[in-house]
Image: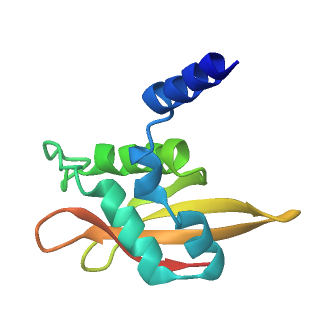
Amino acid sequence: MRKILLLIIISVLAFGCDKDDSKRCEGLRIAVQNGDVAMVKNIVNRLASDLHAQVSTATDPDGHHNTYLTLIDRLNNECDVNAVGVCYACIDINPVTSEIKLTIPLGTGWVTRIIDLALDGEGRLVCTGMHE
């Protein structure tokens, strides 16, 4: 019996879940629920830190449309939130801003927040804020 238990423990340790992805998202749900903008910005920026602009086109002059879509996929697949693109480069301020809607279950209801994304001084897509 001990051998079986030991084998199970070793198997779990050796082949268990990869926690690296979940660590990138750790605390996102709680930060969104609590309206902790600084924490949400930190986590979203960490998720997008390795994403780079693609080739600019006439319809995507900044070249970040694929980055925007990849970030939405990561939020959905790695962070256990429902992320939906609201608009890409649609808010015509300087810098041009995009939005993603995050929806998180809370009790019998939902918490919904919008995160704003824009390019930083180095041309990276970063989270610049969160609102209802």
The quadrant of the rendering that contains the C terminus is bottom right
The quadrant of the rendering that contains the N terminus is top right
Residue 114: x, y in percent?
55, 70
* Image mark count: 0
Identify which residue is drawn at 24% across, 49% down: 51
Compare residues 102 and 27 and report the one nearer the observer: 27
Lateral position of residue 78 relative to residue 48, left or right: right
Q: Is residue 70 above or below residue 29?
A: above
Lateral position of residue 36 relative to residue 120, left or right: right
Identify which residue is drawn at 56% across, 19% down: 7
In this picture the colour scheme is rainbow
Compare residues 104 and 17 and report the one nearer the observer: 17
Can residue 57 be seen in this snapshot? yes
Q: Is residue 34 above or below residue 119?
A: below
Q: Is residue 122 above or below residue 37?
A: above
Identify which residue is drawn at 66% across, 60% down: 103
Compare residues 127 and 25 and report the one nearer the observer: 25
**Residue 102 quadrant:** bottom right
Residue 38: x, y in percent?
42, 82
Residue, far right? 108
Identify which residue is drawn at 48% across, 81% down: 37
Lateral position of residue 38 relative to residue 61, left or right: right
Can residue 90 be seen in this snapshot? no
Residue 78: x, y in percent?
49, 45
